[in-house]
Image: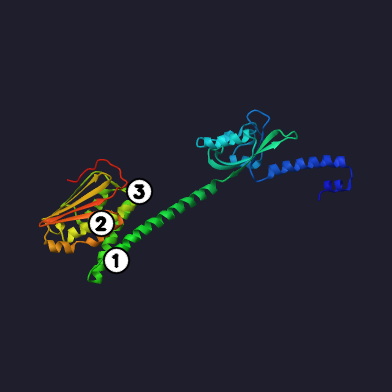
Amino acid sequence: MSNVEASNIHGDRPAAASAQGMADRKELASFAFERTRMPIVVTDARQPDLPIVLANESFLNLTGYSADEVVGRNCRFLQGEATSRTTVAEIRAAIAQHRDATIEILNYKKDGTPFWNQLHISALRDDDGMVAYYFASQIDVTEHRRIQTLEEAEHRLLLEVDHRTKNVLAIVDSVVRLSKTDSVEAYSASVQQRVQALARTHMLLAENGWKQVALDNIVLTQIGVFGLDSVTAAGPAVMIPAPSVQPIGLALHELAANAAVHGALSHGGGWLDIAWQQEGSGLILDWTERGLSRTPTQQGRGFGTVLISAVIERQLGGTITRDWRDDGLSLRIELPALDRVGGGLRGRP
């Protein structure tokens, strides 16, 4: 208990003690205002444009200004090019309505460095109840917002990675289950080749920011592994949405692998033509092989029908139509509506 408080309790010199107590409180308030670590300013509500009349050392340290550069000015000098006009309007409304408000605003230091300011405004009234001053405290929350933004971005990334991983693992699971051979070595090679096909489309997705990928890039990436000398590929610009890129890439790989091992690309006399078009809201891809070296019976048994059907029909909701001929194969894949961007596409010669 202070000496002032003790004097009041015992009734000694009450008037003098009261005056002394008032002086002490003012001195303590001034001391606390100056020494607090929180940046604070006080503006005069009775003067035009609410000029700053007090600014503590913490405020000067935060903003980089001197007291002479601050006192007498409106706080708007802390605003800059990227300061939200909407936020400024919110502050203006709070002052006009004489109400407390806590608002985050982008401010600028004297050297131009931006910082996020958690501004708290409170009206101070005189004995008559009139607003005499506005008290404004500032907290630099720049680092907090940076960490918050990183955490939000990390959360979104983890959700996206989780989604993509599940999609890829579902396809790999299908590859493992549907790959069938008579030996462990052949089975291992078959699975590895299909996983590598998924990896190639994965790279396309990564290069395109995990957004849409041009169909011609998917086609040429998968077919190019087996050589393009006897291949033509042409069609309009069609953008395939990210979730469909790997299934389509895997189906094209399966078709190309069969053409290279058993079909038109397995010898020098064959050729392959790939064409696609938009029909209504859907996509049609025509796969035409000529110059096969097998009989129709061998062709039907050697084709990767099960895996392609699983990807195209079950996963993408499309249909496959095959037309075997004596000298080749005509295959049509019809897919339902996909998000895509139209435009010209330079066809291969």
Q: Amino acid at mark 2?
A: Ala
Find the distance from the CA under tag 1 to the CA under tag 2. 15 Å
> Where does label 1 land, which residue?
177
Identify the mark at residue 77; answer none if there is no mark: none
- Residue 46 in the image: above or below residue 160: above
| Residue depicted at 24% across the width and 45% down the height | 278
| Residue depicted at 22% across the width and 43% down the height | 346
Question: Is 194 on the left-hand or right-hand side of 298?
Answer: right
Question: Is 231 on the left-hand or right-hand side of 4?
Answer: left
| Residue depicted at 86% across the width and 46% down the height | 7
Q: Return the disc, 1 or 2, that comes first in the chain's sequence.
A: 1
Q: Return the disc, 1 or 3, that comes first in the chain's sequence.
A: 1
Question: Is 160 on the left-hand or right-hand side of 192?
Answer: right
Callout 1 environment at 10 Å: few (<14), some (14 to 19), or many (20+)? few
The local secondary structure at tag 1 comes to helix
The local secondary structure at tag 3 comes to loop
The local secondary structure at tag 2 comes to helix
Q: Can you give x and y, in whole percent of width and height, for residue 129 in the image? A: 72, 34
In terms of depth relative to the viewer, which is nearer, 78 or 196?
196
Quadrant, the C terminus: top left
> Where does label 3 land, which residue?
211
In terms of depth relative to the viewer, which is nearer, 80 or 179?
179
Callout 2 environment at 10 Å: few (<14), some (14 to 19), or many (20+)? many
Q: Is the Cβ of the residue at disc 3 closer than 8 Å to that at disc 2?
A: no
Q: Amino acid at mark 3?
A: Lys
Q: Can you give x and y, in whole percent of width and height, for residue 238 in the image? A: 27, 45
Q: Return the disc, 3 or 2, that comes first in the chain's sequence.
A: 3
| Residue depicted at 34% across the width and 53% down the height | 243
Q: Can you give x and y, in whole percent of width and height, for residue 221 in the image? A: 25, 53
